Amino acid sequence: MKQINTDVLVIGAGPVGLFSVFQLGQLGIKACVVDCLSQAGGQCSELYPEKPIYDIPAYPMVTARDLISNLQSQIKPFKPLFLLNQKVEKLMSEKNTFISKTSNGISISSKCIFIAAGNGAFGPNKPPLENIEEFENTSVFYSVTNKENFSNKNIAIAGGGDSAVDWAIELSNVAKKIYFIHRRDKLRAAPNSVKKLKDLTENKNVEMIIPYQIDSIKGTNGEISELIVKNLNGQSKTLEVQFFLPFFGLSTELGPISNWGLEIEKKILKVSQSSCQTSQEGIYGIGDICDYPGKLKLILSGFSEAATASHHCFKRVFPEKSLHFEYSTTKGINTFS
Ligand code: FAD
């Protein structure tokens, strides 16, 4: 198992987790950031990258994507370690140290923990099939990382939103055949993309399987041999595919964080307003995940909480040092070697 030592483990690479790396870095505190998604940005990147945000101070307007990209540039000098595509699942404390374990088997030792987990870990909504886990990451995928894997294969894509439609269009360039499955005639994706997909059915390798729902998967050793779909009249079709890509959107769940013995109410961590510390010393809650009297679920409030928590945790990270408050205009950017 890989072992990482850091000063602060930041759980969540949303805007608030990212900005906490800056605040910590300015105080000479090293951070490791873990997120279960494949990219940084939390809700901004996953839910509304193209939308304009109007209430970030000094930006009359910034898209969510640009905000995240700027935050990433701002924290570059501090060289944070990013562990993406993995969830922090376990947390133990030993004396003054926390040992956390990720779903990829990495063990992280840290002096403090910043929980910047928003509404919880993002994960795919899965089709309700009993045996789907047997096929996951072998022939069932909830995202596409390398489209060449699908070259010259028969693929079933299910869903009605932008991801399903956009990936069907994109993969039609490499796949042998694409079965596009949706339970209703109407697709929710952008009208232009829907038109493009329908055009592809006329002379290319795309076949619409509508209105059908996934009924069952058959196969061995994680490899699909058949996908069976049914319509509302109970008529079924058997699709011979090697891959199945369900795009049913994302959901969030607090998951493991709720088992760490922290004070939680309605899936929100109770923190002290003056420090952002949770009911356990050394563990902080910042951003959408935390609550205190007067809390506003806004990015700008999260930024301020990141600063508060960073200053408060300094004494635990460096017990032998005293903290002298300084403006960034005075000290410039702290750099790590
Ligand atoms: P998030 O952005 O939710 O990020 C949390 C991250 O933690 C996620 O990436 C998640 O995968 C990860 N995570 C959780 N648990 C774990 C775990 N156990 N292990 C690993 N990773 C984990 N706010 C504004 O201020 N202005 C706006 O105009 C605005 N517009 C919005 C528009 C929309 C459509 C939406 C949905 C939200 C909007 N918001 C806006 C709200 C804003 O996006 C949130 O306040 C902000 O994203 C909170 O940031 P965060 O970093 O606390 O959490």
Image (tube, rainbow, N blue to C red):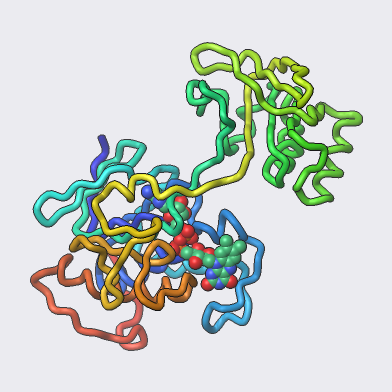
Residue 219 vertical position relative to residue 322 in the rendered view, above or below:
above
Q: Residue at x 78, y 43 (%)?
A: 187
Relative to 175, is 83 on the left or the right? left
* Residue 174 visible within the image: yes
As rendered, which of 318 and 16 lies closer to the eye? 16
Q: Residue at x 79, y 27 (%)?
A: 209
Q: Residue at x 65, y 22 (%)?
A: 215
- Percent position (x, y) of residue 259? 29, 46
Place residue 223 in its image quadrant: top right
Residue 202 vertical position relative to residue 194 in the rendered view, above or below:
above
- Percent position (x, y) of residue 67? 55, 68
- Percent position (x, y) of residue 164? 69, 40
Instruction: Count numbered badges in the picture.
Output: 0
Residue 176 vertical position relative to residue 296 in the rendered view, above or below:
above
- Percent position (x, y) of residue 1? 25, 34
Relative to 109, is 209 on the left or the right? right
Work out which quarter of the rendered image holds the C terminus and state it: bottom left
Q: Residue at x 67, y 44 (%)?
A: 163
